[in-house]
Amino acid sequence: MIGFEVLRSIFKLIKKSVDAFGRLPGWLQVAVAIAVFMVFAHPKSRAKVSATWESICAALRNAQPSLAGVLIQIGDQFVMAKATASDTFAEIQAILPKPPRRSALKQVRTLYLLNKRPLSLEEIERRMRNQGYSSRSKDFRSYLRRVLRESDQFTETVPDLWALNQV
């Protein structure tokens, strides 16, 4: 039995595969295209691919009546569960107060309390963005460097490696 999430995962896998193929260098795309062409041009390979495809289609035709009903039920359950989850999330968000926006300095201090070791400016920026921090600055890294230099809480141990001063 195939679940709705399995079908969704298969679709995502195919989409990511196509995207990954698009990111390959041009020469490698051409090499893969030539290899696929050669598989389909060779009579024995083409016959094997055709036989495999026919067996897959036959198996799907045999399972079609029962599979369609099951997929419809699973899809309905998924849609209902998703709607319930989004309604519950909206109710919880309406009750809870919105947290105040944290400054960049507070965000960096939180990073250092969790890590306890010097971090590069690039690492600080990456971790802040992963935690959901957003900046209106055009060049976030230079803004972050300026904030750290102006603060007496941080020391640049070596170029672009920052440490939290001990209290």
Image (cartoon, rainbow, N blue to C red):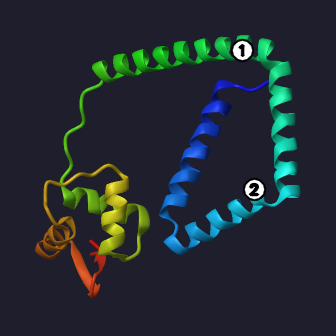
Left or right of 18, for residue 127: left
In this rendering, the count of numbered labels is: 2
Q: Kindly identify which residue carries mark 2.
A: 40
Query: Please, what secondary structure does the residue beneath circle 1 have?
Result: helix
x and y percent of residue 104 in the render?
A: 20, 58
The residue drawn where x is 88% and y is 57% is 44
Quadrant of residue 87 in the image?
A: top left
Do we see residue 10 in this rendering?
A: yes
Residue closest to the eye, 52 or 112: 52
User: Mark 1 highlights which residue?
Assistant: 68
Taking 73 as reference, is 45 left or right?
A: right
Residue 13 occupies which quadrant of the picture? top right
Residue at 82%, 48% (x, y): give it.
49
Residue 140, picture quadrant: bottom left
Q: Secondary structure at mark 2?
A: helix
Provide residue 107's location: percent of width, then percent of height.
Answer: 27, 57
Nearer-the-camera pick, 84 or 92: 84
Q: For residue 109, which numbered disc appears in the image?
A: none
The three-letter code of the residue at mark 1 reads Ala
Residue type at mark 2 is Phe
Q: Quadrant of the C terminus?
A: bottom left
